[in-house]
Image: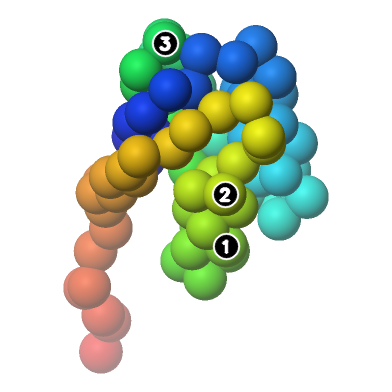
Amino acid sequence: MTILGDVNSTSFVPWIQRHANKLGLSQTIFHSGADRIELEVAGPVELIDMLEMGCSLGPIDVWVEEIQRRVIGWSTKTES
């Protein structure tokens, strides 16, 4: 997940981590800068959707313009 905008607040990364933990999601922050936060999130898609919605609203001291998501390592393979 890549969060773009004015996301330089020192409170935003801990905010993301706290909300991901509340949802039972694992997360790893790879980059945190003034205009971009990149993280990997793992868990049920519905809960990741909830985290994305929360991040888009974010705390009052950030402005999220866009959230980009891509699926990594997901497989549709089924066993017979």
Packing grade of label 2 (10 A; few <14, some 14-19, many >=20) is few
Q: Residue at x 67, y 34 (%)?
A: 60
Tag 2 residue:
57
Sequence-wise first label, 2 or 1: 1
Q: Residue at x 60, y 41 (%)?
A: 58
Residue type at tag 2: Leu
Sequence-wise first label, 3 or 2: 3
Location of residue 16 in the rendering, given as x and y in whole percent from the top left corner? 63, 35
17 to the left or right of 30: right
Tag 3 residue:
34
Q: Secondary structure at mark 1?
A: helix
**Quadrant in the picture for residue 59:** top right
CB of mark 2 within 8 Å of CB of mark 1? Answer: no
Residue 66 seen from this side: yes
Residue 40 seen from this side: no
Packing grade of label 3 (10 A; few <14, some 14-19, many >=20) is few
